Image (cartoon, grey):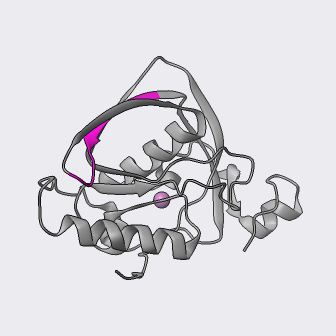
Amino acid sequence: MSVRAVLRMGHPLLNQVAAEIAPDDPVLPGLVADLRDTMLACGGMGLAAPQIGVSVRVVVFGTGAVNPRYPEQAPIPFTVLVNPVITPLGEAMESAWEGCLSLPGLRGRVARCCRIHYRAWNEHGEPVNGEAEGFHARVIQHECDHLNGVLYSQRMDDLRQFGFIEELEQAGRIAPVPS
Ligand code: NI
């Protein structure tokens, strides 16, 4: 399909609650292909439909390979979630640096639930559910936040932990990120 432009923070669509979409909606295969192509072209870890200007509840994440932007993290298989619902498992939270294709050049430290359960539909219109923890759980929470109009910067409780990648790298606060 095609690589689409990624909206950046400030575009009002990124702050809207996205609409549910029928898992057999005929627009879904093309939308998923565009999300995947755009995520791969941008070197992203995940992408939500509102980020390409389509305000529906669809996210994709994972490439099945180690992402050079997050080299210390285990690969996550390519996954499509339609109308996802996530539930925290336990009280435990952990903080880590996050990036987002809608906030290019920036990273911020965000607390997320360590473990979650998710249920959704996949790109074939089949129900899926499972549990995720650590970085995998973080990616799912980040992408699903996009469907509720929430960017990671809105989740931050200490804006001193928010900055430009180059500055954070030079200060040794994050590992070098390939550009
Ligand atoms: Ni994002």
Above or below, 169 against 110 in this view is: below
Q: How many marks?
A: 0
Give the percent coordinates (x, y) of residue 71: 73, 54
Task: Determine if residue 54 is in view.
Answer: no
Give the magenta part as a residue range. 116-124
The C terminus sits in image quarter: bottom right
Q: Which residue is painted at 48% across and 68% down in the image?
A: 39
Q: Quadrant of residue 135?
A: top right
Residue 122 in magenta?
yes
Above or below, 58 against 115 in this view is: below
Q: Quadrant of residue 89?
A: top left
Give the left or right position of residue 90, taking residue 18 as reference.
Answer: right
Give the left or right position of residue 173, taking residue 179 as reference.
Answer: right
The N terminus sits in image quarter: bottom left
Question: Looking at the magenta stretch, what is its main secondary structure?
Answer: strand
Above or below, 21 against 86 in this view is: below
Q: Which residue is painted at 26% across and 55% down in the image?
A: 123
Give the percent coordinates (x, y) of residue 17: 24, 55
Most extreme residue toward the top is 90
Q: Which residue is painted at 42% across and 67% down in the image?
A: 36
Give the left or right position of residue 5, taking residue 148 as reference.
Answer: right
Give the percent coordinates (x, y) of residue 176: 82, 61
Residue 89 in magenta?
no
Give the percent coordinates (x, y) of residue 149: 33, 56
Task: Determine if residue 1 is in view.
Answer: yes
Q: Nearer the viewer, residue 125 or 53?
A: 125
Q: Nearer the viewer, residue 157 or 110?
A: 110
